[in-house]
Image (cartoon, rainbow, N blue to C red):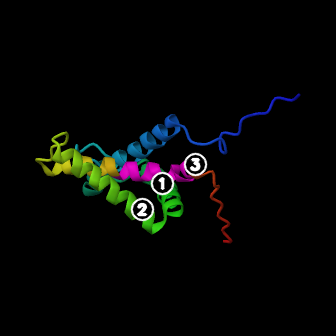
Amino acid sequence: MANKKKDVASSGMTAAGLLWRFLAALALVLLTYNPSGHSAYHWVAAAISISDFGPLHLLLVGVLLAGWAIYWVSTWRSLGPFGFTLAGVILGAIIWLLYDIGLLESRSAAAITWIALIALAAVLAVGVSWSHLWRRITGQFNVEDVDD
């Protein structure tokens, strides 16, 4: 008997796979902008303000835009407008609950910004993982034929 190779793309989602997708989304979001002052936004804005925008800045912008395109399109296609909104509502409710029971504090605009950025990364991670999660929950495949 021949050994069958396990097809990772169709074998389903694991907790580790979801965690890796979340960490990649978090890196994308926080590298793009964060309130610490150390982000692509701050670096590019500073370069533009002193007329020092160069090829490294453009390369970083291009790589970040590619990452955003992958995450945004995948999330939008898998969740759709309703699912995207629902994910935001659920995360908003979780944040509110954590704040209400005292696990989160938001005494500054920076704290609220950090919370919002992490929530955005969570929505993006769920979006790129949704087809796998849907199949694991329901046993149904999501197939989309796009005629471009």
Eyeballing the image, is 1 above or below 109? Answer: above
N-terminal of the pair, mark 2 or mark 1, is 2
| Structural crowding at the residue carrying mark 3, measured as other residues with C-alpha within 10 Å and reported as few (<14), some (14–19) or many (≥20) | many
Quickly name the residue at label 2: 84
Q: Is residue 132 magenta?
A: yes
Report helix, strand or loop for mark 2.
helix
Structural distance between the alpha carbons of marks 3 and 2: 16 Å
N-terminal of the pair, mark 3 or mark 2, is 2
Q: Can you give x and y, in whole percent of width and height, for residue 143 in the image?
A: 66, 60
Task: Give the residue at x 35% y 50%.
Answer: 32
Q: Are marks 2 and 1 in contact (CB under 8 Å)?
A: yes
Q: Of helix, strand and loop, which mostly describes the magenta segment?
A: helix
Amino acid type at circle 3 is His
Q: Can residue 47 be seen in this snapshot?
A: no
Q: Can you give x and y, in whole percent of width and height, for residue 13 in the image?
A: 56, 42
Q: Are marks 3 and 2 in contact (CB under 8 Å)?
A: no
Amino acid type at circle 1 is Gly
Rendering quarter of residue 14:
top right
Dividing the image into 4 quarters, which one contains the N terminus? top right
Quickly name the residue at label 1: 127
Quickly name the residue at label 3: 132
Q: Can you give x and y, in whole percent of width and height, for residue 88 in the image?
A: 35, 58
Report helix, strand or loop for mark 3.
helix
Amino acid type at circle 2 is Phe
Task: Give the residue at x 71% y 35%.
Answer: 6
Q: Which residues are magenta?
A: 120-137
| Structural crowding at the residue carrying mark 2, measured as other residues with C-alpha within 10 Å and reported as few (<14), some (14–19) or many (≥20) | some
Per the rendering, the mark at residue 32 is none
